Image (cartoon, helix red, strand yellow):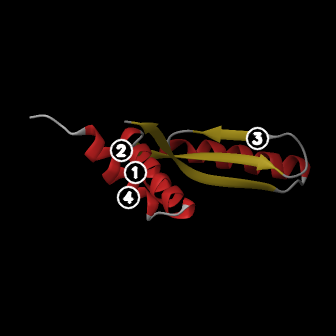
Amino acid sequence: MSVDLDKLAKQVDEALAKETKESLTKWLNKRRQKDERTVMKVVSKRIQCYHYYGQCNDCDFNECASHNGDINRVRNAVRRHVLKTGHTVKIEKGYSIIYNRE
């Protein structure tokens, strides 16, 4: 099967003559986005363990724990610090989500 390059060039020229700079840019940007999504897929995984972080608003005190059972240790350290100093301390609870490329 042979391809008539002159005929193909004429068809391409006719098709491109109907397009504007904006329409071609839009088409090209759509292709780029589609290619990036298929090539660079991002997956996430939530870690099922909570972590706790106690931090003083008035000084450099902080206490952290990375396991669910360690919250009592953080709470006790925070209570001791508040009783000793009178400072305001907050405990934040969170979990981790790991993102990576597939």
Quadrant housing the N terminus = top left
Which residue is denoted by mark 4 in the rendering?
Answer: 14
Residue shown at 45% from the left, 45% from the top: 49
Q: Earlier in the sequence, mark 1 or mark 3?
A: 1
Residue shown at 56% from the left, 63% from the top: 22
Q: Mark 3 belongs to which amino acid?
A: Asn
In x, y percent, where is residue 88? Answer: 84, 57
Residue shown at 35% from the left, 44% from the top: 38
| Mark 2 to mark 3 CA distance (whole Å) | 43 Å
Q: Is residue 36 visible?
A: yes
Q: Secondary structure at mark 4?
A: helix
| Mark 1 to mark 3 CA distance (whole Å) | 45 Å
Q: Earlier in the sequence, mark 4 or mark 1?
A: 4
In x, y percent, where is residue 20? Answer: 52, 63
Q: Secondary structure at mark 2?
A: helix
Q: Are marks 4 and 1 in contact (CB under 8 Å)?
A: no
Q: Earlier in the sequence, mark 4 or mark 3?
A: 4
| Mark 4 to mark 1 CA distance (whole Å) | 26 Å
Q: Nearer the viewer, mark 2 or mark 3?
A: 2
Q: Nearer the viewer, mark 4 or mark 2?
A: 4
Q: Is residue 88 left or right of residue 52?
A: right
Quadrant housing the C terminus = top left
Q: Are marks 4 and 3 in contact (CB under 8 Å)?
A: no
Which residue is denoted by mark 3 in the rendering?
Answer: 62
Which residue is denoted by mark 1 in the rendering?
Answer: 34
Q: Foreground: 26 or 75?
A: 26
Which residue is denoted by mark 2 in the rendering?
Answer: 38
Q: Residues within 10 Å of mark 4 (few under 14, many from 20)?
A: few
Q: Residues within 10 Å of mark 3 (few under 14, many from 20)?
A: some
| Mark 4 to mark 3 CA distance (whole Å) | 70 Å
